[in-house]
């Protein structure tokens, strides 16, 4: 079932508006939505009908709706048509000037309830709030029904579904609507005619003539004539009944066709809005994807640049390491040059044999020098 608050399609010059109130108050039936809807109703509208099918709901949301209906009732007739009304939905119903209930409808009033988490003080505060809500509701019921607040509190404490007859007897509604009663059908016909939706051929058809009064007299001589007239009347009534049936079926089909056309138009508009919303969402998603792709490309480029820089640094480090190794190797292999035999002996700790083995060229140069000195002497 489609739940929420819906204003049925109406002509620009319509004098009546019908609003469906279906679902939980505060969830599907939202105060702000209904408030804006009621305030948008043009001044030309003289009657606002609320078709109610609700199990109740949030007290604060419902109180706001009650106030809006009260304000609306100052300038036009407000009507509640109840199929199911429980809890907070009953307060919305009795806020209307005129109230009816379906012959198989149900009505329930009860004490407010809530859930509390906390210490004893928190629970005591909640209990006080609930008692205030009970008294407030009982006073409002009493004002609208003519009963006493005490009587309303007693019924609220019972928390039971009331049948239409009891609902009417207690003043919650003024009428019970039964679509299967001829008199109720006549009222509906009048409403349809007033709205210009009843087939003209059916509306102009004369009503059937009533039977003759029981106390009227007839003599034997006229009995045959009366019988003939009766047969003729029966035939006329049969023809009239057949014509009524044809026109009724035609009117019903016209109504179905018109309702279907309205539904198609309404849902077509809703589908169009959904499609537009999907298109907008897709556009936003594409834009986000484009930004995501750009960021991904920038990140990939940054990572590549980082990798390239890291590779270059590795190469430089490896080159520096190689040079350092080369330098260290050279430094470890470096030793001062030995040019004289005395330096060689010193380097070898005065060990002649070691110096001769390690520095043979220096020893040879030393001996050559000594030989030259001897020759010179």
Image (cartoon, rainbow, N blue to C red):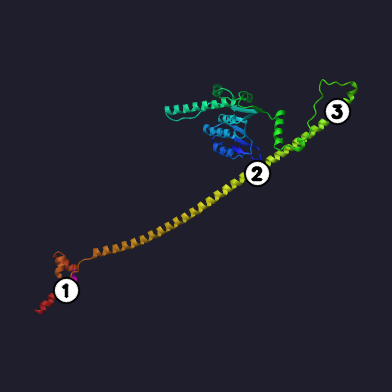
Q: Can you say which quadrant of the picture contains the C terminus?
A: bottom left
The residue beneath circle 3 is: 231
Instruction: Identify the residue at image location x=58%, y=34%.
Output: 69
Residue 180, visible in the rendered structure: no
Q: Which residue, as the protein is rendered here, is positioned at the far left? A: 377
The residue beneath circle 2 is: 265
**Residue 354 sits inside the magenta stretch:** no
Quadrant housing residue 339: bottom left
Relative placement, left or right, of 201 versus 279 is right
Where does residue 135 sit, x and y in percent of width and height?
52, 25
CA neighbours of label 1 inside 10 A, class few (<14), some (14 to 19), many (20+):
some
Between discs 3 and 2, the one toward the N terminus: 3
From the viewer's side, name the closer residue of 61 and 66: 66
Instruction: Identify the residue at image location x=44%, y=58%.
Output: 301
The residue beneath circle 1 is: 365
Between discs 3 and 1, the one toward the N terminus: 3
The residue stretch that appears in magenta: 359-364
Distance Cα–Cα, label 2 vs label 1: 123 Å
């Amino acid at each position: 079932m489609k739940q929420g608050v819906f204003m049925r399609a109406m002509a620009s010059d319509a004098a009546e508006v019908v609003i469906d109130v279906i679902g939980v108050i505060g969830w599907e039936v939202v105060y702000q939505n209904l408030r804006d809807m009621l305030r948008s109703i043009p001044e030309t509208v003289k009657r606002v009908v609320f078709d109610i099918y609700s199990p109740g709901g949030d007290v604060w949301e419902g109180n706001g709706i009650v106030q809006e209906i009260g304000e609306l009732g100052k300038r036009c007739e407000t009507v509640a048509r109840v199929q199911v009304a429980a809890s907070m939905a009953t307060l919305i119903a009795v806020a209307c000037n005129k109230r009816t209930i379906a012959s198989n409808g149900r009505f329930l009033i009860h004490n407010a309830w809530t859930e509390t988490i906390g210490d004893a003080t928190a629970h005591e505060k909640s209990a006080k709030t609930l008692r205030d809500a009970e008294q407030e509701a009982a006073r409002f019921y009493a004002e609208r029904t003519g009963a006493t607040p005490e009587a309303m509190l007693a019924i609220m404490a019972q928390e039971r579904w009331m049948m239409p007859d009891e609902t009417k007897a207690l003043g919650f509604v003024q009428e019970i609507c039964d679509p299967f009663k001829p008199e109720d059908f006549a009222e509906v016909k009048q409403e349809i005619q007033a709205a210009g939706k009843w087939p003209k051929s059916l509306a102009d058809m004369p009503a059937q003539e009533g039977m003759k009064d029981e106390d009227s007299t007839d003599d034997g001589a006229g009995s045959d004539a009366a019988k003939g007239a009766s047969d003729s009347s029966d035939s006329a009534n049969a023809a009239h009944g057949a014509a009524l049936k044809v026109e009724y079926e035609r009117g019903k089909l016209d109504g179905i066709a018109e309702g279907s056309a309205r539904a198609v138009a309404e849902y077509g508009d809703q589908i169009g809005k959904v499609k537009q919303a999907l298109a907008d969402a897709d556009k936003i998603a594409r834009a986000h994807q484009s930004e995501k792709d750009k960021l991904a490309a920038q990140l990939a480029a940054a990572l590549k640049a980082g990798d390239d820089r890291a590779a270059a640094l590795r190469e430089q480090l490896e080159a520096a390491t190689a040079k350092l190794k080369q330098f260290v190797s050279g430094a470890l292999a470096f030793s001062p040059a030995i040019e004289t035999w005395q330096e060689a002996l010193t380097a070898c700790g005065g060990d002649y044999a070691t110096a001769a083995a390690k520095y043979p060229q220096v020893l040879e140069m030393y001996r050559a020098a000594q030989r030259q000195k001897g020759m010179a002497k």
